[in-house]
Image (cartoon, rainbow, N blue to C red):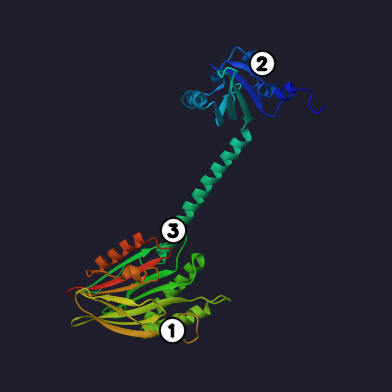
Amino acid sequence: MLEDSVEDLYDRAPCGYLSTLLDGEIAKVNSTLLDWLGYRREELVGRRYLVDLLTVGGKLYHETHYAPMLRMHGQAREIALDLVAADGQRLPVLVTAQVKNGSDGQQQLIRLTVFDARERRSYERELVRARQEAERDREQHRRLTEALRRTLLPPTLPSLPGLEVAAHYRAANSDEVGGDFYDVYPLCGGDRLGFFVGDVSGRGPAAAELTSVARYALRGAAITESGPSAALGRLNEVLRGQRDGVPEFCTAVVGVLRPVDDGFALALASGGHPPALVVRADGAVEVLHTPGAQLVGLLAAPRFTRRTARLAVGDVLVLHTDGLGDDLLDGVRPGSARDVVDELAERLAGSGGKDDAAVLAFGVGPA
């Protein structure tokens, strides 16, 4: 015979068996459970109750969940408990209980199957520990990403008399550094203001590196080159020189603002970047289209499209990356540069967009 008897199968089963009367008095227990707990049979049967083997927390759970569940449904499945062994050590177990009814339908006793959960509990603790470590690593990564992102954006925005400057950056993913960038800087002589807005290809560390290269190349070109188109041409040379078999490119718009009698004169050049907008004081919106402008970094001699405009008192020039779509730009209200940027930032926050977005605005006020 493969098994000596049904009783032997019960007594030496790979799980614990326990039977109690309806009041919890232990009526029967197999050797497996006795071995786990370190008790002799005569120490438990007829002398102890199930609650005597439970921890304080287990006793509370027994009264508030386990016992009511048995009364209402006649069974309880996979209840996680700690049993207290004879030496005071705790044994993590999973308990499944079933009420046995007599021929008259009345409840007679409760049968429990007890599974050793020590390995499972250890595994669960390892999972919790691993999750906590992962959360700490993710938080550290988020902080490093945020610190890197801050280094790629200007800490302050210079201005000129009669010109207000405001900006907003929205990262779509707090765990990654995106490729949107902008900057504002005074030009030689201090009477003009230069700026650029761009979006490099890719995400993560590669995008961060390319963003840094683009920013410093454009800042350097502002000193050495004669205008926005020349600055984009210099950036094109730098990006093509960066290649290691993988194309590196970006869109960008570079511009200069200089004061004139009735406001400010704008000159800009675009390398495949979304067009700038001018929100006029009367609420009209003028789109500064730059048709035919090509990406920066792909071609040896790309075409960059130039555009000029005049900004009067109450006008706001708005530059942005493609994370701010046309649907979010429609109907933007006139106001100060800060007002316009705040409105667009609010629209961005409610859009659920999956791309980074940068907005840079210049508002003309009284000199």
Q: Which residue is mark 1?
A: 233
Q: Does the residue at mark 3 contact the one at mark 2 (Cβ under 8 Å)?
A: no
Q: Is residue 50 left or right of residue 176?
A: right
Q: Which residue is mark 3?
A: 174
Q: Does the residue at mark 1 contact the one at mark 3 (Cβ under 8 Å)?
A: no
Mark 1 or mark 3: whose residue is earlier in sequence = 3
Q: Which residue is mark 2?
A: 41
The image position of residue 153, as x and y in percent, is: 38, 67
Position of the N terminus, as image quadrant, is top right
Q: Is residue 242 left or right of residue 353?
A: right
Disc 1 to disc 3, how far (Cα)?
A: 32 Å
Position of the C terminus, as image quadrant, is bottom left
Mark 3 or mark 2: whose residue is earlier in sequence = 2
Q: Amino acid at mark 2?
A: Arg
Nearer-the-camera pick, 37 or 2: 2
For the residue carrying disc 3, how many other residues have a C-alpha within 10 Å: few (<14), some (14-19), or many (20+)? some
The image position of residue 103, as x and y in percent, is: 60, 18
